[in-house]
Image: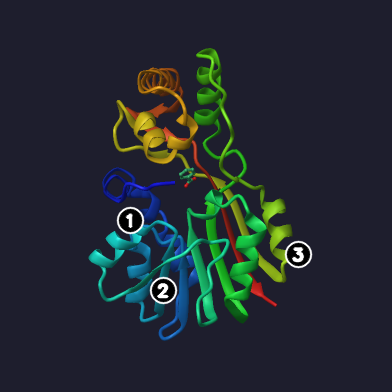
């Protein structure tokens, strides 16, 4: 997956804006403790964590995202690394991850790496897309692609609370808190929001689809979904969130 860090920051800032309460209410960072921000993107939340006095490392698989993060927040430590394979020299007091783990289909590997990189008693605080996330977008995309003779292949991992809690328990975590909830998420452009969202995050669905067919599919998905996803003149994606706090035992 190649990320456009500028497009991410300008049109999809909600990804990190929604992370604020995950920091303040769930993680509650303490001055001086070490925190890993796994899947830090362009580093906004990492910098927010660092501003609390915690010693923070931001990790992301995208060299472009890390380059942008380093440029924006030169005082914060950032590293390139994949969630399923990363190794860092120290164990952390806490690992934080916002809107990343649904990209990681080898979820057991990521959970095992997070467990290994936490101190005993260390906190894991995550938010990811949960079961049913963006269902209406994906179902409409599937239908429109099929109608045009293309195959739609599911891509993301959106677990139920029970499924993810069980994976964490099997890996040696004690799950302390779970919240599974709908969060309709406003898209920046009311006329093209679903197209923009799919162009930003869903490029992989169109591998092998000629550009003109891609555009036709995107236009059709936007056209079909807009009435269903518009409220008070604004367009919302049907996000479902899964938040979990767990302790390494
Ligand atoms: C999400 O945050 O739920 C999400 C973002 C991009 C792609 C898929 C899901």
SS of the residue under disc 3: helix
Which quarter of the picture shows residue 123?
A: bottom right
Q: Nearer the viewer, mark 2 or mark 1?
A: 1
Asked if the residue at tag 3 contacts the one at tag 2, i.e. Cβ–Cβ closer than 8 Å, the answer is no
Image coloring type: rainbow
Q: Residues within 10 Å of mark 3 (few under 14, many from 20)?
A: few
Mark 3 sits on what residue?
170
Residue at (46%, 23%) from the top-left corner? Answer: 228
Residue drawn 59% across the image and 35% down it = 154
Indicate the position of residue 134 as horizontal and vertical percent values: 52, 36
Disc tally is: 3
Query: Mark 2 = which residue?
Result: 57
Q: Horizontally, is 175 left or right of 25 in the view?
A: right
Q: Which label was assigned to residue 64? A: 1
Q: Do tag 1 and tag 3 residues touch (Cβ < 8 Å)? A: no
Q: Is residue 144 above or below residue 186?
A: above
Crowding at label 2, few (<14), some or many (≥20) Cα neighbours within 10 Å? Answer: many
Other residues around mark 1 within 10 Å, as few (<14) / some (14–19) / many (≥20) = some
Q: Earlier in the sequence, mark 2 or mark 1?
A: 2
The secondary element bearing badge 1 is classed as helix
- Rounded to the nearest angstrom, the CA distance separating label 1 from label 3 is 34 Å
Q: Secondary structure at mark 2?
A: strand
Q: CA distance from mark 2 to mark 1?
A: 17 Å
Query: Observer-nearest residue: 233 or 209?
Result: 209
Labels 1 and 3: the sequence-earlier one: 1
Give left or right: position of 176 versus 234: right
> Where in the figure is residue 31, as x and y percent of width and height?
41, 84
* 126 with respect to 24 (left or right): right
């Amino acid at each position: 997956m190649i990320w456009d860090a500028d497009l991410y920051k300008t049109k999809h800032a909600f990804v990190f804006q929604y992370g604020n309460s995950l920091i303040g209410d769930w993680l509650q960072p303490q001055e001086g403790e070490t925190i890993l921000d796994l899947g830090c993107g362009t580093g906004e939340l990492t910098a927010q964590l660092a501003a609390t006095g915690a010693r923070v490392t931001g990790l992301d698989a995208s060299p472009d995202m890390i380059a942008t993060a380093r440029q924006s927040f030169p005082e914060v430590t950032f590293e390139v690394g994949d969630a399923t394979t990363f190794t860092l020299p120290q164990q952390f007091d806490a690992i934080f991850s916002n809107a990343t783990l649904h990209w990681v289909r080898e979820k057991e590997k990521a959970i095992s790496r997070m467990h290994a990189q936490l101190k005993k008693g260390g906190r894991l605080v995550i938010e990811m897309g949960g079961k049913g996330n963006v269902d209406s977008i994906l179902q409409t995309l599937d239908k429109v692609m099929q109608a045009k003779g293309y195959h739609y292949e599911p891509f993301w991992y959106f677990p139920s609370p029970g499924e993810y809690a069980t994976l964490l328990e099997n890996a040696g975590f004690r799950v302390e808190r779970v919240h599974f909830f709908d969060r309709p998420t406003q898209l920046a452009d009311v006329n093209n929001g679903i197209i923009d969202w799919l162009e930003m995050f869903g490029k992989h669905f169109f591998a092998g689809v000629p550009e003109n067919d891609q555009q036709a599919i995107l236009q059709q998905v936007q056209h079909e979904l807009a009435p269903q996803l518009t409220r008070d003149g604004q367009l919302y994606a049907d996000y479902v969130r899964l938040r979990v706090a767990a302790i390494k035992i």
